[in-house]
Structure formats: C-alpha cells, structure tokens
Amino acid sequence: MTLVVNYPSRKSCKENIGKKLSFIETSMFGAEYKSNGEITVANRPHITGQGREWFGRITMENDLIIKVT
C-alpha cells in the first residue's frame, strides 16, 4: 500500500521533519497511516494537484515525521 502525501517533492517533505504528516487516505481496505513505523508514500499530482510524481519511505514516531528516504 502507498499513502498519498501532500508534498510536491521529496525535498519539500524532508523540510517537514519533526512535523505531522499531511496525507490523503485513499485505500478502501483500511487505514494506511501509521503513527509509528515506516510508511511507503507517493505524491500523485492527479490526486493532489501539485508538483510531480515521487515515491519514498517515511519513518514516523509519535505522529511526527522522523526520516524521509
């Protein structure tokens, strides 16, 4: 599963380390968001209307972004 995030680029997402994740839950099979652990993410411009398509992994801890790769 891939969670759609509201960041136009990976760099923009990295600038938000230490903050809450801005995302759009799109799965009809249950929540993809995890407040702790790793999440596979993507910006999908046809859904978010911003930036370019990119994919990455985000590490979350207590609902805050800790790492973006």
Image (spheres, rainbow, N blue to C red):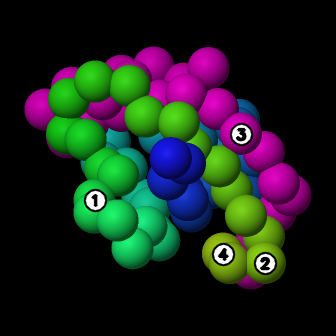
Tag of residue 48: 4
Disc ID at residue 31 = 1
Disc 2 designates what residue? 46
- The reply to whether the C-beta atoms of the residues labelled 4 and 2 are less than 8 Å apart is no
**Secondary structure found at label 2:** helix
Badge count: 4
Q: Using a 10 Å C-alpha cutoff, classify the residue at mark 1 as few (fewer than 14 neighbours), some (14 to 19) or many (20 or more).
A: few
Label of residue 55 in the image:
3
* Image position of 24 with respect to 7: above or below: below
Marked residue nearer the N-terminal end (1 or 4) = 1
Q: Cα distance, mark 2 to mark 3?
A: 14 Å
N-term-proximal mark, 1 vs 3: 1
Residue at 19% x, 39% y is 35
Q: Amino acid at mark 1?
A: Ala
Mark 4 to mark 3 CA distance (whole Å): 14 Å
Circle 1 or circle 4, nearest the eye: 1
Q: Is residue 55 magenta?
A: yes
- Dividing the picture into quadrants, the one containing residue 31 is bottom left
Label 4: few (<14), some or many (≥20) within 10 Å?
some
Q: Residue at x 38, y 25 (%)?
A: 38
Question: Percent from the top left, x then y, of residue 2?
Answer: 55, 48
Tell me the magenta residue range.
49-69
* Cα distance between the residues tagged 1 and 4: 18 Å
Instruction: Name the residue: 39% across, 73% down.
Output: 28
Q: Magenta region's main secondary structure?
A: strand
- Depth check: 17 or 69 in front? 69
Residue type at tag 3: Phe
